[in-house]
Each structure stands twice: as C-alpha cells, then as structure tokens.
Image (cartoon, rainbow, N blue to C red):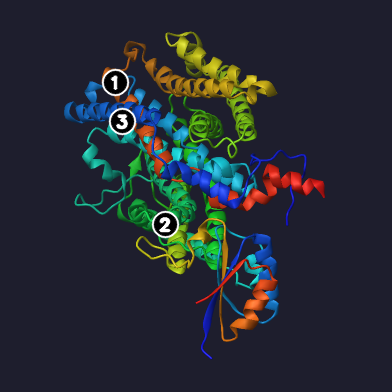
C-alpha cells in the first residue's frame, strides 16, 4: 500500500474515520431536512433571481437603450459582469483537472462543489453577452449553421466567435466532467434509499446514477476517462480566459491592445475563482458539518494559490503601466494615467487595494489559516476583481480618440438588477446543489482515506 | 452439478486485492467484483485488460480536427470569402492562425463528449438502466466478489481463507 510522508498534514481529520463514516457524512445533507437558515437564504436568493428575470424581461421588451451603455462606452456593465463571472468559473475545472494531473490529493475535498460553482458561474456569465446582442431570439446566429440567407456564415477570424466556441466547449465539458464524478455518488445515495425503503428517492437517484453498479471494468474506464478529461480540460481552462482577453487584446483601443492580456486574465480568473470557492466552501463546511473533510489545510492551500495569482496580477498591472509609458505612444500613456487619476480613479484604486495589497496578507500563516480573515479577504478579492474588469472596460472606452465624444458611464437600475439577478441565480443553484447532490466526491475521497487521513497516518507512523 | 453463483463480501480493499491475486492464481475465474470506489491494484490482480478508451478519444479528436479544418475551409474560403478590413481570405494556409482557437475548441469538444458517450455505451450506463450490483452495501463500504462455479465447497473454503467476511451461495 502506498504511504504518504508522515510530515505531510492529513487531509481527512476526525478520530473515527471509515469508509462507512464518509458515506454517512456525505449522504447526511442529501437525506436530511433543510433548516430555517437554508430556507431563509434560499428565499432571498430566489427573490433576487426573480428580480433579475424581471429586469431581463424589461430589457428585452424595451431594448438595450434601457441600459446606461452609450455610443462611446458600448461595452460596460454587462461585459464587466460577463468577464467577472467567467473568471469565477475558472476555479472548478482548474481544481479538478490541473490538480488531478499534478496528483494533488487535497482537490478531493473541494472539487465537487468547486465544479458546481463553475457551471453556475458560466451560466450567469453567458446571460450578459447573449442579452447584449439585443435580439435574444436570434442568439443562435452565432452558430455556423446553414441558413436561408445564402452564404452567410459566421466569421471564424473574430475573437467574439472564438468566445462562443470556447465558452460552449468549456461549459459542456465541465458538465460532463462534473457529472462523471457524480454518477458513483448518486449510486451510493440510490442504494442507501433502497435499504431505507424510500421508493421515491431510490427512483430519482437510480435515474441520476445511470444504473451505475461499480464493476471493476467500470472503474477502470471511469479512471481513464477522468484522466483524459483532465488532460483535455487543462488547456481548455487556460484557453477560455485567454480567448476572453483576446476580445479586448485584438482591438486597437488604448488600454486593451496589450499582448500580456491572456496570461494576465488567466491569473486573474484563477485568483477570483479560488476566492469564490473559499466564500462558498467556508460556509458549506460549517453548515453541513464537513470540517473534517474540508480542513484548514485545504483552505491554506487555496489561500496560497490566491497569494500567488494575486501577485501575478499585481505584476501585470505594473507591467502594463510601465509599458504604456515606455512605448512612447501618447494614447496608451494617457489611457493608463486616466485610469489612475481620471474621473474613475476610485475604481482603479479600489482594484489596486483589493487585488494587489490585500492578498499579500496571506504571507502570514496566522492570517491564511484564520477562517474569518480568509472569508473576508475572499470577498475583498472578488470585489477587487469586479473593479478590475470595470476599470479595463469602462475607463479605456470613456475617453477615446475624439475628445468631443468623451463621456461618463453610470449603470441604470435595470443593469444593476440583472447583476443582482445573476447573483440570485448563482446562490439559488448552489443552495439547491448542496441539498440534492453529494457535495463531496465520496468515491474519490475513499481512495485516499488510508493514505491521507489522520487516523491511518498515525497508525502507519507507529510501525 | 449445476453452476452456482457465490457472492463473497470483503470488508477491506487491501484484503480484497490480495484475495483476488490468490483466487486468480488458483485458476478460479472471478466473474465480477463490485466496489464502492476504484480499488488500485484490483484490475491488475484480476488481469483485467487495459481500456482503450483513451485511444478512442485521440481518434475522436483527430477526426474533429480534420472535420473542423474542412468546415472552416468550406465556409471561409470556398463558399464565401469574407473581406474584413481589406484582408480577404484567399488560402487556408495563410489564414489558419486566426482559426486555431476555433479548431482547438472543436477538437476538445468532440474528443471529450464522444469519449464520454463511449464510456456510457461500453459500461452501458444510461438514465433508466437498472443497477447490477447484487448488494446495496457495495456502493458504501463493502466489496463483493462474484464467482460462478460447480464446486461451491472448495471455492467457499478458499474465499474464507482469503478473508471474506460473508459468503452467500445463490
């Protein structure tokens, strides 16, 4: 049997850990009843979602003119939110794919919830560009399908079309990856329902589990497909935000026309994605009493990634600033000086404080292992990342080449409402997930129980 | 004598793997083992052949790349040459750098999805399929070995020796 180094901290705590105990702990949230707290949170999130639907309906009925975007600032609140959500949707597949390839065992406690979060975040993201098209009912025109207009194809040289392909692929492949892992866990709940005699639940989870029976060959295929999907998803994760950044980088707008955009956006996406995972997981582990599977060590690892990617983002900001001056292009220099000292200076400095300075606090072990501090900083990071997108998009556009068309941008209540609606959808979906789906990949976790749990590590060390 | 099925339950994965090795060495064919998770070393102990699903995925990806190239060539060069900003698409060769993102995404899309469908077909798991594990505990913490044999006494004795905690003859 493979043994892990004794100095490595255990990933499964608790004094009475066993395969059955893992099953019990994971099944508890699905089989139990929701408490008042859950219903309160669900109601608030659901109402916010309805509000968002209302605002979307208003937008479709009235037109994009109901938004604050104007001729100069053509992309504003919507694309800011699109990039923000897509960024958040990066942590899930990164955790499950990249960390799988690197054989990081700590991914197993958090990959399921992080992937769920990814999928919900990508849905939220997709809403914005689709509605920004104006005529939502023609959204299928982005697909290269034969049509009645003769030789009218999509332009494959356009970064906006690359985005369509990247996000569609990312979204559907993430769902497949997530669902594959869920199949054996649904089977576990199905069989428990069978033993308990709960016919209704057995039927639902039998359908969800695709009739999984856990034969040797099934597991061989399962592991192979997981590995190959991880191999396919790893370049996919990096490509998605690279392509999102090319929406900007291939244009000639000063402040957007930057070759460092792809790596800078990917680092930012991982940064904000991990922050959102922390925000959700810190609450989830507490509410569902999963502290022994999502340990402080897991949180520390995630904080270290936040510190690293936060520093990368900080370097990117400084590089951009330096290059804009060093290039000698007045328009570039102005765009950057305008960001820091123009009318939107507050957004720029908010971004700088939240993204560059605050993650540096994680150099202190006391702070990165403190749950309250982590929770607050995770929200600070996502606020900062929202402002980063706002700064890149709005401040680059609002003062363009022609000073007579310079203007300011303020969102309308409808735009704000749509954003609140996506937040509502995100939390509604995540809360539902936490009650219906096994939130920890228990079948994967069982494979590391004898390697990384506290009880077994102590037992091994005694020999 | 008629062939009978033996269900032997094991409580521990390490015991199971060493038992599988011994049973295989004794020349008894293990029909199936149902486990709650991927037990490492078990496929090797039972000499289960390697899966070729990764090769399939590679071929799907390759086909998708070919189809993608053809599709982009057909739409952008053959059917309608778009002229954006005075830069018309005349040849596939000169314009392909701008299409790498789309070709890459299409390749990954097809490789991933068709591989997943291959898994579903090969393992025959679909919504509505009835599970085949004979004991519901095998998705929790028990490991069930299924052996079909004429000589139930001999096999049961061997199973007991190798550490089976329950033996049921069906």
Q: CA distance from mark 2 to mark 1?
A: 51 Å
Q: CA distance from mark 3 to mark 2?
A: 28 Å
Residue under the image location 61 percent in, 49 percent down: A18
Is residue A292 rendered to the left or right of residue A124? right
Give the quarter of the figure containing the N terminus of chain B: bottom right
Query: How far across and how far down the image is residue B106, in percent?
Result: 43, 52
Q: Please tell me whether mark 2 or mark 1 is closer to you in this view.
A: 2
Tell me the number on the disc at residue A209: 2
Residue under the image location 48 percent in, 59 percent down: B61
Residue under the image location 50 percent in, 28 percent down: A279
Residue placed furthest toward the bottom: B1
Q: For this rendering, which residue is in front, A302 or A400?
A: A302
Using the image, name the chain to which the residue with label 2 belongs.
A
User: Is residue A29 visible in the rendered structure shown here?
Assistant: yes
Q: Earlier in the sequence, mark 1 or mark 3?
A: 3
User: Is residue B54 visible in the rendered structure shown here?
Assistant: no
Find disc 3 in the rendering and name its residue.
A46
Is residue B119 rendered to the left or right of residue B8? left
Q: Earlier in the sequence, mark 3 or mark 2?
A: 3
Q: Earlier in the sequence, mark 2 or mark 1?
A: 1
Describe the element under mark 2 as helix, strand or loop: loop
Find disc 1 in the rendering and name its residue.
A71
């Amino acid at each position: 049997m493979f043994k892990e180094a004794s100095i490595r901290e255990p990933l499964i705590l608790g004094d009475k850990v066993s395969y059955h105990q893992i099953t019990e702990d994971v099944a508890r949230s699905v089989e139990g009843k929701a408490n008042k707290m859950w219903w309160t949170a669900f109601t608030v999130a659901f109402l916010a979602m309805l509000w968002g639907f209302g605002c979307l309906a208003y937008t479709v009925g009235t037109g994009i003119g109901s938004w604050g975007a104007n001729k100069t600032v053509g992309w504003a609140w919507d694309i800011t939110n699109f990039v923000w959500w897509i960024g958040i949707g990066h942590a899930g597949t990164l955790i499950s794919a990249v960390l799988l390839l690197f054989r990081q065992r700590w991914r197993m406690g958090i990959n399921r919830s992080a992937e769920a979060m990814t999928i919900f975040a990508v849905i939220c993201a997709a809403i914005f560009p689709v509605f920004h098209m104006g005529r939502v009912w023609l959204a299928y025109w982005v697909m290269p399908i034969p049509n009645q207009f003769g030789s009218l194809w999509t332009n494959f040289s356009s970064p906006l079309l690359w985005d369509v392909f990247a996000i569609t692929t990312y979204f559907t492949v993430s769902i497949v990856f997530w669902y594959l892992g869920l199949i054996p866990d649904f089977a576990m709940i199905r069989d428990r329902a069978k033993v308990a005699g709960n016919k209704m639940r057995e039927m639902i989870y039998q359908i969800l589990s695709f009739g999984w029976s856990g034969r040797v060959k099934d597991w061989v295929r399962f592991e192979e497909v997981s590995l190959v999907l991880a191999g396919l998803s790893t370049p996919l994760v990096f490509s998605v935000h690279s392509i999102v950044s090319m929406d900007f980088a291939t244009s000639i707008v000063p402040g957007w026309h930057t070759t460092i955009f792809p790596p800078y956006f990917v680092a930012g996406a991982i940064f904000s994605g991990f922050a959102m995972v922390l925000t959700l997981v810190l609450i989830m582990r507490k509410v569902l009493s999963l502290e022994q599977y999502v340990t402080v060590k897991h949180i520390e690892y995630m904080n270290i990634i936040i510190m690293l990617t936060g520093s990368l983002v900080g370097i990117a900001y400084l590089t951009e600033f330096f290059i804009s001056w060093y290039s000698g292009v007045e328009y570039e220099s102005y765009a950057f000086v305008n960001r820091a000292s123009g009318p939107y200076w507050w957004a720029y400095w908010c971004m700088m404080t939240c993204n560059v300075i605050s993650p540096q606090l994680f150099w202190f072990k006391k702070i990165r292992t403190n749950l309250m501090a982590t929770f607050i900083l995770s929200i600070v990071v996502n606020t900062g990342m929202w402002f980063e997108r706002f700064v890149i998009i709005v401040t680059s556009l609002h003062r363009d080449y022609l000073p007579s068309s310079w203007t300011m941008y303020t969102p309308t209540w409808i735009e704000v409402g749509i954003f609140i609606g996506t937040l509502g959808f995100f939390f509604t979906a995540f809360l539902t997930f936490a009650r219906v789906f096994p939130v920890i990949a228990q079948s994967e976790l069982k494979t590391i129980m004898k390697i990384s749990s506290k009880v077994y590590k102590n037992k091994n060390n005694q020999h | 004598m008629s062939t009978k099925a033996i269900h032997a339950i094991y409580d521990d994965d390490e015991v199971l793997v060493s038992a599988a090795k011994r049973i295989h060495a004794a020349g008894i064919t293990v029909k199936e083992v149902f486990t709650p998770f991927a037990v490492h070393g078990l496929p090797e102990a039972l000499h289960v052949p390697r899966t070729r699903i990764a090769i399939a995925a590679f071929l799907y990806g390759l086909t998708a790349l070919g189809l993608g190239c053809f599709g982009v060539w057909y739409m952008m060069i053959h059917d309608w040459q778009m002229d954006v900003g005075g830069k018309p698409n005349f040849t596939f060769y000169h314009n392909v750098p701008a299409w790498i993102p789309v070709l890459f995404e299409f390749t990954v899309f097809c490789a991933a999805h068709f591989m997943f469908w291959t898994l579903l077909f090969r393992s025959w798991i679909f919504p509505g399929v009835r599970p085949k594990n004979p004991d519901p505990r095998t998705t929790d913490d028990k490991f069930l070995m299924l052996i079909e044999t004429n000589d139930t006494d001999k096999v049961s004795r061997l199973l007991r020796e190798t550490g089976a905690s329950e033996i049921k003859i069906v």
